[in-house]
Image (spheres, helix red, strand yellow):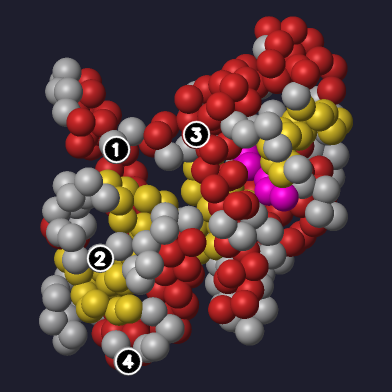
Amino acid sequence: MIRIGLDVMGGDYAPHAILAGAELAKKTLPEDVRIVLVGNKEIIHKQLKKYPVLKDCADIVHAPEVIEMGDHPTKAFSQKQESSIAIGFKLLEQKKVDAFASAGNTGAMLVGTTMTVKTIPGVIRPSIAATLPNIHNGQTVILDVGIAPDSRPDVLFQYGLLGSLYAQYVFKIPKPRVALLNIGTESTKGNLVTRSAYEIMKDTRHYQFVGNIESNEFFTSDKADVVVCDGFVGNIILKEAESFYLIAKSRGIKDDFLERFNFEKYGGTPVLGVNGNVIIGHGISNETAIKNMLHQTLEIVRADLTNKILKAFK
């Protein structure tokens, strides 16, 4: 039995969108998957009357407190130990769930990750990985997209390995190609950090490094399966992509490729390099995004990604 912990109280549209998404997911998830609903028990019981499938196929763990979206992450996580996020991480730490997913306060999720399940030994800094489409009908993993605005060259080198393992075991790419995001393809281009990272990455045997890639190639080139950058740059690219989709949608542009930029299709982003399966969803997640986040969480659990990363860093 696979047990996925779900923060019912996290997100702009909680608890309604969370439970509605879980109901949708449960209709298509395998029977060996059980959703553990973490949140205020009274609120959940009241809302479950609307979701008959979920009502019969989920467990409830009471968490009376909520970390609000505007709360200070570190203070809130430390002071609200009965919150849905804190309780969810306790369940993950105690192996009572195989993964924990939330669309709640991102900062609190990151604090919870480092304070409970902690970083895998050997990993300098964990990373958040996202996927974005390219015109060759594939998708590109990009990391980091938010944990570390500034990254040392050795951290970027490790991101290449984390991203490669993610692409290999979750997206079934036998030998993922890893590129470094830069302002030019030549090895001499970029700032001191990217030039130094290139020197470390170019001779590695841990993954297939294919050199630098420019931002104008990101969506059009079939050069790489994984693109490495610091969290500052990655977060800008991710939000630009989301904005691009919203502009196209607002102008009535309908296109199959552009539709793949809809964040709802991806659901959430995993935190890589930690001792547990942690998935962070967008704060504005609706029921479709929550459904897809749960399916993505299942894929990561089944890929045994955390243990694959643990072995790679031994």
Label 1: which residue? 261
Asked if marks 1 and 3 touch (Cβ < 8 Å), the reply is no
The dot on residue 292 is 3
**CA distance for labels 1 and 3:** 14 Å
Q: Residue at x 82, y 29 (%)?
A: 60
User: Of the residues under marks 1 and 3, which one precedes in the sequence?
Assistant: 1
Label 4: which residue? 203
Question: Count the marks: how many?
Answer: 4
Q: Nearer the viewer, residue 74 or 196?
A: 196
Instruction: Decide: is 176 above or below 94.
Output: below
Label 2: which residue? 224
The part of the chain drawn in magenta is 98-102
Query: Quarter of the image containing the N terminus?
Result: top right
Which three-letter amino acid code belongs to the residue tagged 4? Asp
Q: Is residue 245 left or right of residue 231?
A: left
Residue 100 highlighted magenta (yes or no): yes
Q: Residue at x 75, y 24 (%)?
A: 57
Asked if marks 1 and 2 touch (Cβ < 8 Å), the reply is no
User: Of the residues under marks 2 and 4, which one precedes in the sequence?
Assistant: 4
Quarter of the image for residue 124 reads bottom right
**CA distance for labels 3 and 4:** 37 Å
Which three-letter amino acid code belongs to the residue tagged 3? Asn
Magenta stretch mostly in which secondary structure? strand
In this rendering, does residue 80 appear at all? Answer: no
| Label 2 secondary element | loop
Q: Is residue 213 left or right of residue 164?
A: left
Q: Nearer the viewer, residue 207 or 89?
A: 207
Residue 267 image offset from top left, x and y in percent: 48, 37
